[in-house]
Image (cartoon, rainbow, N blue to C red):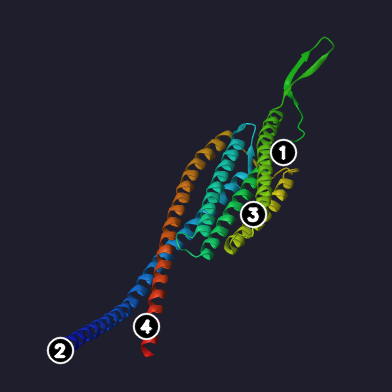
Amino acid sequence: MKLLYPTLAVSVLSVGMSLAQEEKEEKEIDLEARKASIPIIEGHIEDRQERMAEIANDIMALDRRLEAKLQKVVNRLASIKDSTKSGYRVSQIKMDAMEGLRKTAENYQSKRAALITEIREGRTGIPKEVLESDAKIFDQHIEKRVEQILQLSKSFTQDASVKKYEQVEGSSYYDGWGWGDASRISDEYRQNRRDRTMNKKQRNEMITALKKSIERHESLIAGFKDSLENRRMSEADRELMRSEMNRHIRILDTRQGQLEELIIVPQPATAPLTRDAAMDLQDALKDAASDMRRDFETIFVKYADLNRERSKVFKLKRNLEARKKWIAEYEAKAKE
């Protein structure tokens, strides 16, 4: 019985030493495995960054081409007007283009709102600085669309003093008092009435839209000011909210200036388009609009791809940083 205790003690000690040795060996193996994984992860990051750069370059190249084509169309439309032969056609083309630009701005606004939500929630792990930079790009595109809409709005023919009647050449009549020349309502007068009607319609829509925008931004600014009084708000949320409030203040100032621009619009320098030319232009713009719509869709699809790659890269970088930190701490502890 006396021999049993020393034997048991030796056995326990032996097992303990064996487990400690195994643990040490496992850590050494884990250390070597983690060291070996570093260049693999770094290579993975490099590959994904290259892919990320490819997608970003594709987006920028397509965006540049699209913006150039769109501005070319806007400039072309802003340089023409209806003739006595085209009637309302050119004005309607312009109004359709303005509606298309408005919808594009709304798409960018929707994407921007999703970015702000992501900045606040941080689900994808993409740094907020990157997303904030994207939001500024969307802001630029939104404001560009508004400027283009205003450019078209101010290109409508303004009301002018046009002589209502014109003399009918080679025609005269006798009214019981004497002979007189026959007259009729001139084509120019009729066209001026059409121009005035279309300009009034689009101008009222523009003014209404700008006033609604001003009211919306004023309401949002007031809401932000109230929310910022909340002392329990996190500093990150406070910073984001303050940034958004300042953005709305800037936009409010811009919209108020744009509204003032529409109060008095000078007669634009535009050239009349014949009926056939207006019809041909309408067909050409339908094709161009279809092309640009597909390009916009492609940009947004690629942007979603870019964010997936970004999320993957930043996740890999965090993993790499954690492994390097673990190795450094382990080696420092081993030297103690």
Q: Earlier in the sequence, mark 2 or mark 1?
A: 2
Q: Kindly identify which residue carries mark 2.
A: 3
Closer-to-camera residue (64/204): 204
Mark 4 or 1: the one toward you: 4
The amino acid sitting under disc 3 is Ser
Q: Kindly identify which residue carries mark 4.
A: 330
- Packing grade of label 2 (10 A; few <14, some 14-19, many >=20) is few
Mark 3 or 1: the one toward you: 3
The amino acid sitting under disc 1 is Gln
Q: In the displayed structure, does residue 255 sit left or right of residue 301?
A: right
Q: Quadrant of residue 87?
A: top right
Q: CA distance from mark 4 to mark 3?
A: 47 Å
Q: Position of residue 259 (x, y in %)?
A: 71, 46
Query: Relative to 246, is 34 above or below?
Result: below
Q: CA distance from mark 2 to mark 1?
A: 116 Å
Q: Kindly identify which residue carries mark 1.
A: 158
